[in-house]
Image (tube, rainbow, N blue to C red):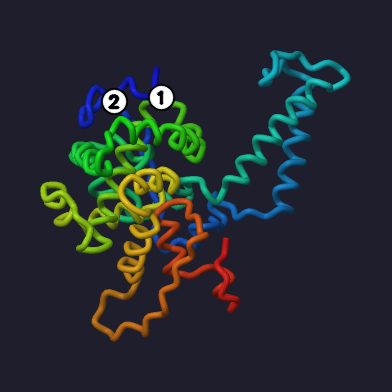
Amino acid sequence: MEAAAAWDGPCEFQLANWTSEEPVAGLPVDYASIDIPGGACGLQAYDENDVQLQLQQHLVEYYSAASQHNITTSCEKAKVSDDNSDARCVAKQVVDQFKADMNMMKQKIHRYPACLGTVDKSYTVPRIVALGPYHHGLEHLKKAEEVKHVAACHCTGEGKLLKEMYEVFIPVADCARHLYDKDVMEGISEDDFRHMMFFDACFLVQYMLMRASSRYKIDKSLKGFLSPNRRDIFHDVMLLENQIPWMVVEVVMTFLMPMSSISKNFVYKMRRCMLPSDHREPPEPKPFIWYEDYKPPHLLGLLHYYIVGPCTALLGTGVPGP
């Protein structure tokens, strides 16, 4: 299917059934670390020694299994012989895939650990809008799907067509696909995922524009939905499993204005969202420093970075962390 085949005009959309099989909960905002997930409940922090041990374990398991079973590899369907040559091919494929997954750990859209399944749903399930595949298709979130299409119409820059914007967006969306849970992605076609990422990113950018500054012009009818629901939407965009990769958000922002301008103003205004809600005197605000080189995994990671602070800055170096 060609990239532009789904578009007949600048504001005509091809709707698709993007329902995932099993919606899963998200993570409370204050849970450990977003940039480098950790803890004993399934999201392990990256440790090179641990990785090496796991790689060795994979090798042992696969060499053992390879001597007894027929194994399909990416290069051919091979039956392992006594010299284990095919087992080495299988093992290398497994090791390479494992390394690739670990290298993407910081950018992945992590899922809620099963051992924390008793956490209240107010911390896990979106109220208004689903961003990404993990909660897509829930009945109470369907109203926002129409709003996403309206948001997309207003994300094109002056003189730009939605079709043109979408064609630029496609290769980035294809890269983002690998950052989601593989089991969930098996049930979503390539075209459906591209559309999902596109509309979700447009919705998020319009919401960021509205919250960032009053000088950004938002369509009046679109603002009529976003503004009254701004608190519930903010709750939703702070959920762990309701994130979309930052790379797809950046593509949409480049069609409107310099993306750092939108991100910086949004973070500057919203970074105080974690302060206590009582009437005590708030602490003296720290100087706001914007790090142009920092690449967040998603919006939650971006806010976490500027609320908590970069790791090395906390150690007194003043240099942004990874």
Picture residue at 37% right of the left edge, 63% below the top = 264
The percent position of residue 206, horizontal first and vertical second, equals: 26, 50
Picture residue at 58% right of the left edge, 45% below the top = 104
Vertical arrangement, residue 9 with respect to residue 22, above or below: above
Determine the CA span between mark 1 and mark 2: 10 Å
Res. 141 visible in picture: no
Picture residue at 26% right of the left edge, 56% below the top = 209
Vertical arrangement, residue 161 with respect to residue 38, above or below: above
Left or right of 234 in this view: 84:
right
Q: Quadrant of the N terminus?
A: top left
Q: Earlier in the sequence, mark 1 or mark 2?
A: 2
Q: Which residue is mark 1?
A: 189
Q: Secondary structure at mark 2?
A: loop
Q: Secondary structure at mark 1?
A: loop
Q: Which residue is mark 2?
A: 16
Q: Amino acid at mark 2?
A: Ala
Left or right of 188 in this view: 62:
right
The percent position of residue 295, horizontal first and vertical second, equals: 50, 55
Vertical arrangement, residue 2 with respect to residue 321, above or below: above
Q: Quadrant of the C terminus?
A: bottom right
Left or right of 244 in this view: 33:
right
The percent position of residue 54, horizontal first and vertical second, equals: 71, 44
